[in-house]
Amino acid sequence: MVRRISALIGGATLAFAAMTLSASAQTPPPSGQTVELFPQDPGSAVVEELQVIARPPGPALWLVEKGGAKLYVVGSAPPLPHQLKWDSPRLNRAMGEASLVLVPPEASVGPLQITKFFLTGGGGVRQPFGKKLEKRLPPDLLARFVSARERAQRTAVPYKDWKPAVAGFILLSDFRQAAGLSEAKPVSTIERMAKAKGVKVKAMSQYRLGPILASAGKLSDEANLACLRDALTELEYEGGRPTTIGTDWATGDLTSVRARYSTSAAQRCVMRAPGGPGLLAQQIGQSADALNEALNRPGVTIAVVDLAVLLPANGVLDRLKASGATVTSPAS
């Protein structure tokens, strides 16, 4: 169970990194309304370089060059449909030249973390002994939660012992699974492409789960309920678009991706937690550092970076350009 919650919270934390350091909590949009990726963020200074160029086939792909090194950056936007079919001639050619594929940071979970998690009663993210989640939710939120878990084909049992914030993200993950959406794609697909061509795959970095669990455990009761509301809003948004999630990403339609791709639930939740902004800064910085390191050696590298980390002002793309790299969208 600890490994399950580590994967869920770890995934949410990567999504949290979409926020810029100066971002603040935002009011969740009404269900069914178009969600903007960064409503208060001007976006990366290099994003328009992709939009003004005739769009080649496949998902959005940037070419970053520095010295004699080339870095192809695939912008990912999970979740994507399990059965989504997509092809990218540019990525296929790059894979034939690459010696390394970098994938997003992964969580490090050790025996001491697992022991501490249980000894502290779940690190503050589990309900007090004898208390159950659905018994403690206000009526309006309870109705939405029950409706959502029924859509996810789940009973109350998997969520009953978790605080609202964590329960919300577990439910969101369960709903995606039931709806045929994968939080692992497109990373898992690109990893298979690399394996087929004998290209090494490496995580950009590792991050410790302990500080994330500690931060989540310090959420107030009010913040926990707010995080749950945001997670349910995201679930309802995705559930209303079963045929379009992924199609815009697969065709490289960045404008449409940004119009519907939202990590706002995780963003708002982490910003409510003590130390949240510092965790965001650390993850964006680690990703940018890993890509800069790849550019310091000759040859070709491919990196898969969540658009939520890639596109905001002072995000990964802006930081690569500020370091002296040239960022363009390669022609087909």
Image (spheres, helix red, strand yellow):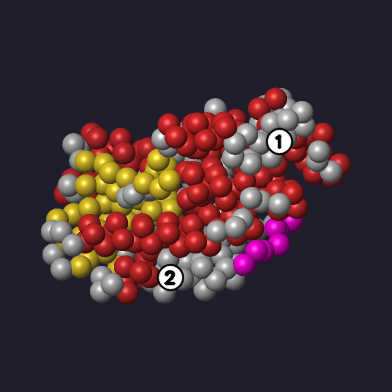
Point out the stretch of residues depicted in magenta.
24-31
Residue 63 percent location from the top left of the image: 27, 62
Name the residue located 43 percent from the left edge and 37 percent from the top edge. 109
Q: Is residue 173 something that shows in the picture? A: yes
Residue 207 percent location from the top left of the image: 40, 48
Name the residue located 39 percent from the left edge and 43 percent from the top edge. 106
Work out whether 239 lies above or below 76: above
Horizontally, residue 123 falls left or right of residue 208, namely right
In the rendered structure, does residue 121 fall within the stretch colored magenta?
no
State the residue in front, 213 or 289: 213
Work out whether 66 lies above or below 129: below
Which SS type dominates the magenta stretch? loop
Please state which amino acid type lies under the numbered disc 1.
Gln
State the residue in front, 284 or 249: 284
Residue 95 percent location from the top left of the image: 22, 46
Quadrant including the C terminus: bottom left
Name the residue located 25 percent from the left edge and 70 percent from the top edge. 325
Instruction: Report which residue position mark 2 lands on.
Output: 314
Q: In which quarter of the image is residue 172?
A: top right
Instruction: Report which residue position mark 1 lands on.
Output: 127
Horizontally, residue 175 falls left or right of residue 305, namely right
Q: Residues within 10 Å of mark 1 (few under 14, many from 20)?
A: some
Q: How many discs appear? A: 2
Q: Which of the numbered marks, if any, corresponds to residue 243?
A: none
Q: Residues within 10 Å of mark 2 (few under 14, many from 20)?
A: many
In the rendered structure, does residue 28 fall within the stretch colored magenta?
yes
Please state which amino acid type lies under the numbered disc 2.
Asn
Horizontally, residue 296 falls left or right of residue 178, namely left
Work out whether 286 lies above or below 156: below
Q: Is residue 80 something that shows in the picture? A: no
Q: In which quarter of the image is residue 29?
A: bottom right
